[in-house]
């Protein structure tokens, strides 16, 4: 048995109940359209050719623990799955090959059924840049409220929901909580992850009043959530027995894909890719949390690299002056400026400006040149001041960019109206 953890106290349940996770953007009758974002997918030879310890799929199968649900009649219904099975497996393997080894290792360390390593396939297709219309983002599709609850940092520079390491840790913490919340029932925990624990608890109480069973299959839940759990189980049983479902599992070698490095200065992601001899897109997919294409001016400054690129990167790091690690923008002080205002407009702290410019006593002078830590937006960036009648769509059209980019660069909450006078950073590269 997995994860026998006592339930939280009643007061904590009252405090947190009703906080949903998110809703999926896809219709329940289909799995998410997943863009293949890695290189060629290779179909694995028969498992017997590969030593078991070298095949990540074998390791995953050994940790599956929800087998008793694989034969439920609901899993045979086409409404939960209408995609080509092999194409879908190929897509999620191509995308997930970067992250699955890490996710499986973290789940094993927490003694959690490895079916949950497949949850990002249902959530995002293993695409860390995935966003839903419900403001959910990343591999595990955290909405802002749940992200805050589990300590996922979000600011102008960085969104931990997109970070594969931070978001995986938070997802595991959340799933463990839900498992306790629902008295050791993984199906209810998974349903709550999708539909919100409040809705699941309400459905349980409704059945209790009517004297009905309170297992997942017996509950009256939103249509999407009723399909969400079967989809995960259907995918899990395909992985458990690919031959039975006439699919081939693409090769996944059981070894780490990436390594992490803690840096003492900011670094531009594109520059880091060049220094490591890695494709820029690949580097960005490993470090999607850095929204402006450069590590945080303060923290975090951790960089993920393909494992085989570490030595090359270390050599390049030693040979490259720190001032070439990231673009440095220069701001000329104008009359009426204050250091705190300059910092705020550029998504920086006053302390980081002081450190970068050896400023004493917060004193600046008109005409003084101030170095701004790398923003990822060099001389081809502009500032747009919101005026009456502006909308994100109009601004995006004016600069021939996407609304999604504007919101990412400026950490905009789409639920709130744009404020007249607000300054937006716009990259026109």
Image: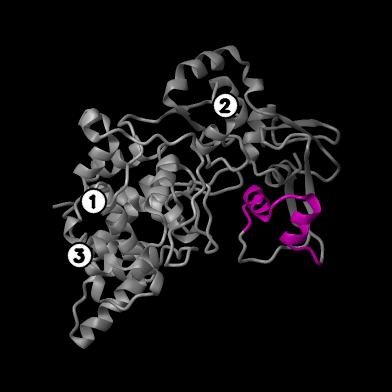
**Mark drawn on residue 273:** 2
Instruction: Give the magenta-colored segment's residue range.
Output: 389-412
Q: Residue at x 47, y 28 (%)?
A: 305
Residue 227 against residue 366 in the figure, above or below: below
What residue sits right under mark 3 in the picture? 183
Q: Position of residue 336 (x, y in %)?
A: 83, 46
Q: Which residue is mark 1?
A: 244
Crowding at label 2, few (<14), some or many (≥20) Cα neighbours within 10 Å?
A: some
**Secondary structure beneath disc 2?**
helix
Along the line of sight, the residue nearer the viewer: 374 or 34:
34
Q: Is residue 187 magenta?
A: no
Q: What separation in Å lies between label 1 and label 2 (alpha carbons)? A: 42 Å
Q: Please, what secondary structure does the residue beneath circle 1 have?
A: loop
* Spot occupied by residue 29 in the image (x, y as percentages of width and height): 42, 67
From the viewer's side, name the closer residue of 28 and 167: 28
Separation of marks 1 and 3 at Cα, in angstroms:
33 Å
Q: Position of residue 414 (x, y in %)?
A: 62, 62
What's the residue at 40%, 69% (across, down)?
A: 224
Q: Would you say 225 lies left or right of 243 here? A: right
Q: Residues within 10 Å of mark 3 (few under 14, many from 20)?
A: some
Label 3 secondary element: loop
- Most extreme residue toward the front, as rendered? 246
């Amino acid at each position: 048995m997995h994860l026998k953890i006592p339930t939280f106290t009643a007061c904590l349940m009252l405090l947190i109940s009703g906080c949903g996770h998110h809703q999926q953007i896809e219709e329940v009758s289909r799995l998410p359209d997943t863009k293949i974002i890695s290189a060629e997918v290779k179909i694995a030879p028969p498992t017997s050719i590969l030593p078991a310890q070298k095949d990540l799929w074998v390791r995953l199968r050994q940790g599956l623990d929800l087998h008793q649900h694989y034969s439920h009649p609901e899993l045979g219904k086409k409404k939960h799955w209408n995609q080509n099975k092999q194409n879908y497996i190929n897509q999620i393997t191509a995308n997930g090959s970067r992250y699955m080894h890490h996710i499986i290792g973290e789940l094993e360390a927490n003694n959690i059924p490895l079916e949950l390593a497949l949850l990002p396939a249902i959530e995002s297709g293993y695409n860390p840049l995935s966003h839903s219309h419900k403001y959910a983002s990343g591999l595990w599709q955290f909405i802002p409220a749940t992200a805050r609850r589990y300590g996922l940092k979000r600011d102008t520079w960085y969104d931990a929901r997109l970070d594969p390491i931070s978001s995986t840790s938070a997802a595991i913490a959340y799933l463990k909580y839900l498992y306790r919340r629902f008295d050791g029932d993984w199906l209810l925990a998974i349903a709550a992850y999708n539909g919100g624990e409040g809705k699941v608890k309400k459905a349980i109480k409704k059945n209790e009043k009517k004297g009905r069973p309170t297992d997942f299959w017996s509950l009256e839940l939103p249509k999407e959530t009723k399909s969400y759990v079967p989809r995960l189980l259907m995918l899990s049983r395909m992985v458990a027995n690919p031959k039975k479902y006439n699919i081939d599992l693409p090769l996944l070698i059981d070894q780490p894909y990436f390594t992490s490095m803690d840096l003492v200065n900011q670094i531009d992601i594109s520059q880091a890719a060049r220094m490591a001899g890695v494709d820029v897109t690949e580097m960005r997919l490993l470090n999607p949390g850095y929204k402006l294409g450069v590590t945080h001016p303060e923290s975090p400054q951790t960089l993920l690299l393909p494992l085989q690129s570490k030595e090359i990167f270390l050599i390049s790091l030693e040979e490259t002056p720190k001032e070439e690690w990231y673009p440095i923008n220069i701001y000329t002080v104008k009359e009426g400026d204050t250091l705190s205002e300059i910092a705020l407009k550029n998504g920086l702290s006053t302390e980081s400006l002081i450190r970068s410019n050896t400023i004493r006593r917060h004193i600046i002078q008109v005409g003084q040149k101030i170095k701004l830590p790398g923003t990822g937006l060099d001389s081809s960036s502009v500032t747009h001041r919101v005026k009456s009648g502006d909308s994100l769509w109009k601004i995006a059209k004016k600069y021939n960019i996407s609304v999604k980019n504007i919101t990412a660069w400026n950490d905009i909450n789409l639920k709130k109206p744009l404020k007249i006078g607000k300054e937006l950073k716009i990259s026109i590269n």
